[in-house]
Every structure is written in C-alpha cells, then in structure tokens.
Amino acid sequence: DQQVKQNSPSLSVQEGRISILNCDYTNSMFDYFLWYKKYPAEGPTFLISISSIKDKNEDGRFTVFLNKSAKHLSLHIVPSQPGDSAVYFCAASLKANAGGTSYGKLTFGQGTILTVHP
Amino acid sequence: DAGVTQSPTHLIKTRGQHVTLRCSPISGHKSVSWYQQVLGQGPQFIFQYYEKEERGRGNFPDRFSARQFPNYSSELNVNALLLGDSALYLCASSLRSGGAGQYFGPGTRLTVT
C-alpha cells in the first residue's frame, strides 16, 4: 500500500526555468510533509517542510504548496540550477494522536530524478 | 556541529551472517530512526528509538533489531542475512519523537552475496 506517491520518475528542466515536483498521498492522518534531496552515495538532505495547517511555505528558491482537499503537494524550484540535479523525495508523518507507535515514522514516495540542463 | 555519522560506510557480507550498523546522532538529538533504501525506491522505516526506548517499528522481520545507548547513539543488527537485505541503510536523528526535523546520515551500503 503506497500511501505516498511520486508519479513522475524523472523531470528534465532548463537552467533558470521553474522545476515543479509533485507528490500525492492517500492517508488523511498525515499532518506534516517534508521534501528531501538526495545525491548518489549520500543520505537525504532536508530541503523544506510544511504543516497541514498551512497551504504554502517558502524558503529562498524553494516553495512547497499543500492542497489538502486533493491530498497533493508540490515543490517549486525557481530558478532551477544545474546543482539542483538530484533525486527528490517527498515524505509524510502522522498526527501525534493518530500515529501511535508510528508517530515518528516518515513515509516516503519513490522519488523523482530532477535533471537541470545548463 | 557534526551531522549524523554512520559506520561503516560499506560492507560486504555472506548469506546467513549477521551485521551490526552504527549511528551517532547530531549532538542534542534524542531520537534515532533507521530506514532501508533499496535501489529505485524511497527509504522504508525500520525502527525509531527515543530516549533509549523503541517508539516505532516498521514492517520488517524479527531478524532486524536495534537499540539505543545512554549517549543516544544506536545500533541496527540484522541476523541471518538474505540477498534481499542488500540496501542502503540510513540513520536519521531528531530532537523529538515526531516526524518533523529528521536529519539523515550518509548511510551504510550493505551488500549480501
């Protein structure tokens, strides 16, 4: 049961343009969402997060949008740079009062490979 | 400040052997979580420990076990290794037991032959 899905395995973007990475989830008890970037042979690096009480969070070139009714979130990178080329994972965690023993568990999507061309 | 550290970086084991992976959290972090990432997939949750107690367990067999020490470092043990256990094992630390604020180490690449 894949509760967090990233349906696009890969995305190719020109340098300077916008990159939009998408993520869908099925569990309405998720209340905190995170995006991680991962280079080969390294662990995931935290990028940005959003609580379910918000619909947008911005940090520099990165903006995350949350649409709770559609159970959809997206990560916008503007402008895209070649150094942004990596695998991007979205992840979700449960509400404290619903998570039980899974409160600290992050559920990840399959990842999207972003390639930014110079 | 140092980030999350893991050891060893790589190791190769034979089917049936056991392995111990180690993780040191960011200073001040009391929670350590373990994840398994196989090629082409996102990390899968194995365990979470907070204040030296197991707080969560993923859908992994009993061959997988872990513990957290008084200094908040952690070990992941896997017994009776199978070929399918070949993966990148990631450790994440956080201040609290929730899902927010988890920072990952570089991982240990385990190959079972």
Image (spheres, coloured by chain):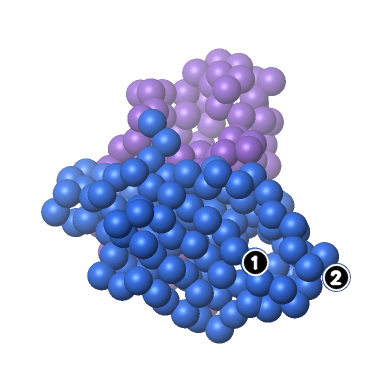
Chain colours: A blue, B purple
In this rendering, would B27 be left or right of A114? left
Give amino acid for label 2.
Answer: Pro
Nearer-N-terminus badge (1/2): 1
Q: Which residue is mark 2?
A: A118
B60 and A46: which is toward the camera: A46
The reply to whether discs 1 and 2 touch (Cβ–Cβ < 8 Å) is: no
Which subunit holds the residue at mark 1? A
- A102 above or below A97? above
Q: Which mark is residue A19?
A: 1
The residue positioned 61% from the left and 72% from the top of the image is A77
Instruction: List x then y, in percent, for residue A8.
Output: 61, 47
How much space separates mark 1 and mark 2, taking CA atoms? 14 Å
The residue positioned 53% from the left and 60% from the top of the image is A36
Dot 1 lies on which element? strand
- On the same chain, marks 1 and 2? The answer is yes
In this rendering, would B32 be left or right of B6? left
Which subunit holds the residue at mark 2? A
Q: Which mark is residue A88?
A: none
